[in-house]
Image (spheres, rainbow, N blue to C red):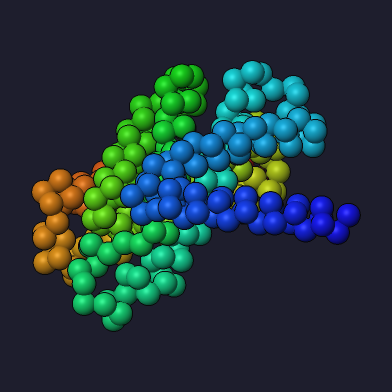
Amino acid sequence: MVAVSQETVMAIKSYQSQAEVLVKNYILAAPFIPYTSILGGLVASKLAFDITQLISTFYIKNYAGLTKIQRIEWNNRGMSSIHAIFIATLSLYLVFWSDLFSDHQSTDFVTLRSSPLCIFGLGVSVGYFFADLGMIFWFYPSLGGLEYVIHHSLSVIAVAYSMFSGEGQLYTYMCLISEVTTPEINMRWYLDTAGMKRSTMYLINGVVIFLAWLIARVLLFVYIFHHIYLHYDQVVQMSPFGCLVVFAVPSALFIMNLMWFTKIIKGLMKTLAKRQ
């Protein structure tokens, strides 16, 4: 029995060793990270969609009474919330807490700095944006109109280019911090769909949306433009398309953010007026 047990242990260790070699040399090897992370983002999006559906079926009593398209949007918003929490957390860490993009830690151009973790995070986001964009097109316009198509298309182009080229990853992650507002927006839809539009929770969530949007989608973008201005000599050393992405994408997103922000203000004022 002891000999058999030892043989079994040796076999398991052998398989573990082969798996580690496979992961190290192929799945996590630098040339393959963009592709494996995109695939991982697609798979994770599908899992998040299914998990949201599973949990909602058993624990959300109003879920069964929703229409088919409402249930699809419910699950889709769960998927987007999970991605938002992941990428916003990673973006905050890389931009503000890690030393990768610090001006005091390296003499290299900040516009050209990258790491395997950066590439992995961007790849996961590309996978998510592809999955969500596919669902938007498939159920158009039930899951979002033209503004969502434009937003996701710009995001895919900017994130994918930054991932494959290694250029401007700092500014890409700065923009991705704005995903911190997504769970609150989704919660607003959940509460509305569940018939809780007049609840205190709905009002509190509206105030949180206002504050989060102001910080992450208005003031943050002002900081991005200021950072680009201070590092203009490094930005212009990027490729022509890289410069276009850095200047055009944040500007377009900022304009869209301001448009949505005016709607948020109007909606919050309307809610407050009704409660008074």
Residue at the farthest bottom position? 104
Query: Taking the image as drawn, is residue 206 in sight?
Result: no
Looking at the picture, tell me which residue is in the foreground, 267 or 131. Answer: 131
Q: Residue at x 54, y 55 (%)?
A: 20
**Residue at (64% x, 25% y) in the render:** 71
Q: Is residue 59 positioned above or below 214 on the image?
A: above
| Total labels drawn | 0
Between 197 and 163, the residue placed more toward the observer is 163
Residue found at the very far right of the displayed protein: 1
Q: Position of residue 64 (x, y in %)?
A: 75, 24
Residue 145 pos. (x, y %): 41, 26
Q: Describe residue 56's horizontal placement relative to residue 220 as left or right.
A: right
At 11% across and 49% down in the image, what residue appears? 240
| Picture quadrant where residue 144 is located | top left
Q: Position of residue 13 (x, y in %)?
A: 66, 56
Front in this rendered view, residue 138 or 258: 138
Q: Quadrant of residue 114?
A: bottom left
- Which quarter of the rendering shows the N terminus? bottom right
In this rendering, would 64 be left or right of 234? right
Left or right: 207 in relation to 98: right
Residue shown at the point (13%, 52%) measured from the top left: 239
Q: In terms of depth relative to the viewer, which is nearer, 190 or 89? A: 89
Image position, residue 109 (x, y; %) = 20, 68
The image shows residue 4, relative to residue 231, as above or below, that is above
